[in-house]
Image (cartoon, grey):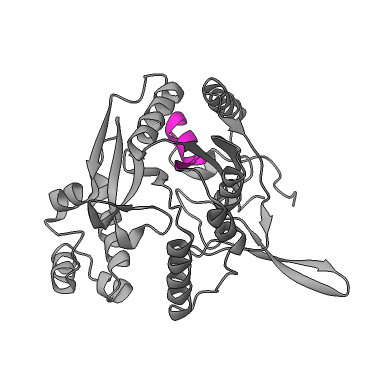
């Protein structure tokens, strides 16, 4: 029997991807944002408790060394910012272990950019401008910005900032999510992720670019605290039609606070039986040197291409998804 070798997506989608990438590069060139390239293999990895990573062994006799495939180029790009690069962007591959499904492939294409001296609101506006360019005014009708607390209360009646296990458990039991308590236990961030994805996110309109900002502090490892309310961090996510496309921060600059958050996440990973990565001390050194005030965001380009092509599965917009690679 002949081994299947053909690509999973049509030639027209390869062409659409190429046009999308060209439009992105033109967009940033017009704003004098520098395109950069950073390593996919690194000595360290992010500590986010919700992400798993790939490792490989670098064999250099007489010893070998564990390297990590990057879940995001974020840490290396921040080292460039600290070195004086100015505003930068990157289009690259990223890797996340254990992620496969309608919106997930373990290897995917990411657009990440950082704007020096931008507030979070300015970066949100720039995300909207990029989306209007890519969608050419055909699929998007409007843009809305809503706080996490507002949208969470609107669809659940729950307080996102003050955790109450009894209230959260009662809500999920009454709304057909009986498995929530076993999954989330006493972890506020897990409860928020579960309820948001099941009860809030599906309500977002398909023709609207929805930006949710003001995330609870327990959900934001790399964002600044809101100076007016320490329960909130300066983070946003963008959605179209219930599909999460990107995640942005007003970036944390304090190396002491960043190290504290790294240590907290490492303990969480250990407590939940997840593999523990090496902490990125080079990022901490860059923050001690001084990184300029900036805001940054990462957008999944394969999901964006799904929307542009009206595709119902990520495997239809990737030439060789994991099951055919």
Could one spot residue 229 in this view of the protein? yes
Q: x, y (%) of residue 116? A: 48, 36
Q: Is residue 7 above or below residue 280?
A: above
Give the residue drawn at x 25%, y 33%: 144
Q: Nearer the viewer, residue 301 or 91?
A: 91
Q: Residue furthest front?
A: 289
Q: Position of residue 219 (x, y in %)?
A: 34, 59
Instruction: Residue at the far right: name it.
Output: 61
Relative to 122, is 169 on the left or the right? left
Q: Quadrant of residue 16?
A: top right
Please report the bounds of the magenta region as a residue range: 293-310
Q: Residue at x 37, y 52 (%)?
A: 224
Q: Is residue 193 visible?
A: no
Q: Residue at x 53, y 55 (%)?
A: 287
Residue 307 forms part of the magenta stretch: yes
Q: Is residue 270 above or below residue 152?
A: below
Q: Is residue 250 left or right of residue 78?
A: left
Q: Nearer the viewer, residue 223 or 274?
A: 223
Question: Relative to 293, does residue 31 appear above or below in the rendering?
Answer: above
**What's the residue at 20%, 59% (across, down)?**
160
Number of marks in the rendered image? 0
Indicate whether residue 110 is drawn in magenta: no
Q: Position of residue 321 (x, y in %)?
A: 60, 47
Does residue 225 appear left or right of residue 303 in this picture? left
Please provide percent x and percent y for residue 111.
53, 39
Frontmost residue, 288 versus 86: 288
Residue 248 placement, left or right of 226: right
- Observer-nearest of 136 and 269: 269
């Amino acid at each position: 029997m002949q081994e299947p070798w053909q690509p999973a997506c049509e030639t027209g989608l390869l062409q659409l991807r190429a046009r999308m990438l060209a439009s992105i590069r033109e967009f940033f060139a017009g704003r004098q944002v520098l395109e950069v390239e950073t390593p996919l293999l690194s000595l360290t990895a992010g500590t986010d408790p919700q992400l798993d990573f790939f490792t490989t062994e670098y064999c250099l006799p007489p010893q070998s060394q564990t390297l990590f495939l990057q879940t995001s180029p974020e840490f290396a790009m921040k080292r460039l910012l600290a070195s004086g690069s100015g505003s930068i962007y990157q289009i690259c591959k990223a890797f996340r272990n254990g992620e496969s499904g309608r919106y997930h492939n373990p290897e995917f294409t990411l657009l990440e950019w950082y704007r020096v001296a931008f507030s979070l609101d300015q970066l949100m506006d720039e995300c909207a401008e990029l989306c209007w360019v890519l969608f050419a005014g055909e699929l998007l009708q409007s843009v809305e910005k809503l706080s996490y607390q507002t949208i969470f209360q609107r669809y659940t009646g729950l307080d996102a900032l003050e955790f109450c296990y009894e209230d959260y458990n009662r809500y999920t039991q009454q709304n057909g999510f009986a498995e929530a308590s076993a999954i989330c236990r006493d972890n506020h961030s897990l409860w928020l992720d579960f309820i948001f994805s099941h009860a809030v996110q599906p309500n977002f309109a398909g023709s609207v670019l929805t930006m949710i900002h003001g995330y609870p502090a327990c959900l934001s490892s790399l964002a600044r605290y809101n100076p007016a309310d320490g329960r909130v961090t300066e983070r946003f996510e963008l959605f179209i039609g219930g599909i999460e496309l990107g995640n942005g921060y007003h970036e944390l600059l304090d190396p002491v606070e960043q190290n504290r958050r790294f240590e907290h996440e490492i303990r969480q990973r250990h407590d939940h039986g997840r593999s523990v990565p090496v902490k990125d001390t080079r990022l901490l050194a860059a923050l001690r040197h001084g990184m300029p005030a900036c805001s940054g965001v990462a957008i999944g380009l394969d999901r964006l291409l799904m929307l542009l092509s009206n595709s119902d599965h990520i495997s239809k917009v990737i030439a060789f998804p994991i099951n055919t690679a």
